[in-house]
Amino acid sequence: MNLIFFLCGAVAVAFVLFISIYLIISGLPAIREIGLIDFLFGDRWASTAAEPEFGILPFILTSIYGTAGAILVGVPVGFMTAMFLSKVASKKTARVIRTAVDLLAGIPSVVYGLIGMTVLVPAVRVAFNLASGACLLAAIVVLAVMILPSIISVSETALNAVPKEYEEASLALGATEIETYFRVSAPAASSGIAAAVVLGIGRAIGEAMAIMMVAGNVANMPSLFQSVRFLTTAIASEMSYSSGLQRQALFSIALVLFLFIMIINVTLNVLLKKSRKEG
């Protein structure tokens, strides 16, 4: 059994290494030809023009702003829902809400995009008197809804794993239930909650289809009420007809996206370890 477990772990590591090596080999040629500074900090993407330009700064900023907005909206809502399900709700109520959350997790991305395109985008256009409701705001709202199931499920599991003795000791010292939940249970479950945030960030920054349908898919610098294009949608929208340097540049975008996710994971893990040591 130890050998089987080792092989399973080795396969997972091998897949990560294979993806990393493949993206590096496929993405570096375009970066060398375009130039790292021009590629990362160029503000114009015109891959099919007579004189093509491959600046991905609008895509990078849009992905950062969109993911940050979704996290700012989704994490508090998801965490509070998980706290309610774990500590406050009755078993019957928690069962009903948990079923709804599970169903939300099973909805395909394209369905989120379809509903966003037919309901949310027109609502944003009317509410803010815009020419088009396909904008960064609509993308943030869709992403916030899409990351809720991951955040709720993982956070609730982490909260349920907190030993009851911690809460009982806090209550015995005179703390209220709400104080106990937020000052004892939540810190004790911080590693699981951090994992939920990482999963949410990964889902938000890696989403393509739904965002393509509600964000407008135009290579503009990010603005809340303007059509934008994310790193993922840039790859998905052009890969089918790309060739030559354009195709290599799309692999370079994938490499940048992969590095973003790795940096986010490492940063959160370092911050979590630091907070544990200080605690």
Image (spheres, helix red, strand yellow):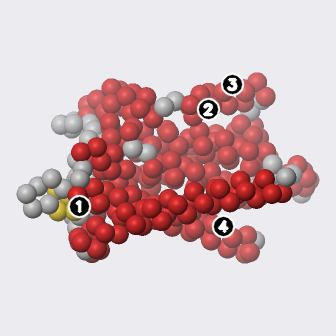
Name the residue beneath numbered marker 4: 272
Name the residue beneath numbered marker 2: 101
Q: Secondary structure at mark 1?
A: helix
Distance of mark 4 from mark 3, alpha carbons? Answer: 33 Å
- Checking the image for residue 17, the label placed there is none
- Checking the image for residue 245, the label placed there is 1
Q: Secondary structure at mark 3?
A: helix
Q: Are marks 4 and 3 in contact (CB under 8 Å)?
A: no
Q: In the rendering, at what x and y percent does residue 149 appear? A: 59, 39
Q: In the rendering, at what x and y percent does residue 85 appear? A: 71, 37
- Under mark 1, the amino acid is Leu
250 is higher (above) or lower (below) than 85:
below
Distance of mark 4 from mark 1, alpha carbons? Answer: 41 Å
- Checking the image for residue 96, the label placed there is 3
Sequence-wise first label, 4 or 3: 3
Report the residue at 32% width, 37% height from top.
214
